Image (tube, rainbow, N blue to C red):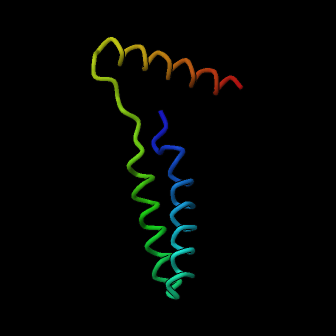
Amino acid sequence: MQSKPKFTGLSIALGAVLGAVFGVLAGHMVVWLALGVAIGMLIGASFRRTEPTCPECAQIHRIHEIRNQRQQASS
């Protein structure tokens, strides 16, 4: 199972871009860039995979994860 979602880097980059844009508009580049990166990190951390709640679904997901790990190891 992946520990970090794939969208974390994308959201940090998006936050940095938005922070840079607001920094250019406001004239305080460093402050807005830092705020943009921080907001991007918060957005990226909020994208989490929901775990299944019922035991049957949890077992099926574990079987899929084991199968995927075996396929990646054999590649």
**What residue do we see at 56% from left, 75% from top?**
20
Q: Residue furthest left?
A: 54
Q: Nearer the viewer, residue 2 or 73?
A: 2
Image height check: is 38 above or below 59?
below
**What residue do we see at 28% from left, 17% from top?**
54
**What residue do we see at 42% from left, 64% from top?**
39
Q: Residue furthest bottom?
A: 27
Query: Measured from the top left, where is residue 46 in percent x and y?
Result: 38, 49
Q: Residue furthest front?
A: 25
Query: Measured from the top left, where is residue 7 in percent x and y?
Result: 52, 47
Image height check: is 14 above or below 1?
below
Q: Quadrant of residue 58 in the image?
A: top left
Image height check: is 16 above or below 5?
below
Query: Measured from the top left, where is residue 19 in percent x and y?
Result: 51, 72
**What residue do we see at 50% from left, 52% from top?**
8
Q: Is residue 13 left or right of residue 4?
A: right
Query: Measured from the top left, where is residue 38 in percent x and y?
Result: 43, 67
Q: Quadrant of the C terminus?
A: top right
Q: Residue furthest top?
A: 56
Image height check: is 46 above or below 28?
above
